[in-house]
Image (cartoon, helix red, strand yellow):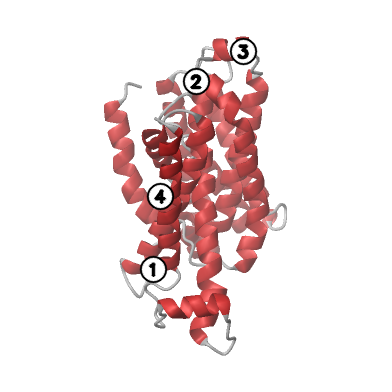
Amino acid sequence: MTRPFYGLTIALTAILLLFLGWWNLFAWSVIPIQAQDVWLSLTHFDSQSISHRIVQDLRLPRLLTAMLVGACLATAGTIMQGLTRNPLAAPSVLGINAGAALGMALVSTLPVLYGASSTSLAAMIGGGVAWLLVMLLGSSWRIGGNERGRLVLAGVAISALCAALTKAVVIMEEDQAAGVLTWLAGSLADARWQTWQHYWPFALAGLFGALLLTPSLNLLQLGEEHARNLGVNLLRSKLFGSFLVLLLVGTTISAVGSIGFIGLIVPHMARLLVGQDFRIFLPVAMLLGATLVTLADTLSRAISYPMETPAGAILALIGAPFFIYLVRKRTL
């Protein structure tokens, strides 16, 4: 594929993202909002206009958060697939989502842990412990020990364990159950400017760090022995990549809840469009992830209008069949 084709792919994806973002700002609103209301709210804001207030205070922060969530989760999945050279690797498959959810549930429900740490830190710690266990069980820290089947089975086992513990915590603390269950479903309905302000600095730092990791990810695709001979510090690259995954996934889960399968689906879509070069592949994955979450958030208001369906549920309906397809098509 030629560089002009790459440029055209990125441009078309960006245009699609802008179109969906514009549509997201006024579609399926209980209080009718016209496209011209959105434009006027952005250029000539009137604080007395209800439609302008809805766009500025509700729809715009929600849209920005959805785009950043998609980019972060797609990047996390891309890094995991690059580090493990496993096409089934993703935060939702290899236990990070479940571990982060467990960490969040613990600090949100158990009185003894109230105020012990921030929700972002709790999510990162929970996801980190789960990821460490999966990597150890899957033998992914030692050279030549990256067995696809073992890694995926370890991820499924740790995910099941964390999910069971999360349910146990929710059952024991029934007063907090409703809020935790809503959060576990993964929804952008409560995303406000405060959410955005706490989220974007960590998210952008993680995305920038991922771009710095792309040369090492390219060399790792040649095999760990070849990458080491070409000057890649395998342990440092894996530790740095793992930290970026935890930063991206932990802060995302603390902001909007557990949203799965973006990290599994999007890297395959990007790879199909622009090939294996992570320098091109990763930015395209970011754009596609942002586009897919924005679409899911828009559809979440349409499916059961005027009620909302969690965006995480919509993405799970898309991702689960895709995961089954990958398992059937690829030899573990």
The earlier-in-sequence mark between 1 and 3 is 3
The earlier-in-sequence mark between 4 and 2 is 4
The residue lying toward the viewer, choosing from 28 and 4, is 4
From this view, report whether residue 189 is shown above or below residue 289. below
Query: Farthest residue in the front direction?
Result: 4
The amino acid type found where label 2 is placed reads: Gln
Which of labels 4 and 2 is toward the front?
4
- The amino acid at mark 3 is Leu
Give the residue at the far right of this rendering. 116
Residue where numbered disc 1 is placed? 308
Residue for badge 4: 12
Q: CA distance from mark 1 to mark 4?
A: 29 Å
- Marks 1,4: beta carbons within 8 A: no
Disc 1 versus disc 3: nearer the observer: 3
Helix, strand or loop at mark 1:
loop
Question: Which residue does the numbered mark 3 point to in the structure image?
Answer: 230
Question: Residue 329: x and y, percent?
Answer: 27, 27
Compare residues 194 and 230 and report the one nearer the observer: 230
Q: Residue 143 shows which numbered tag?
A: none
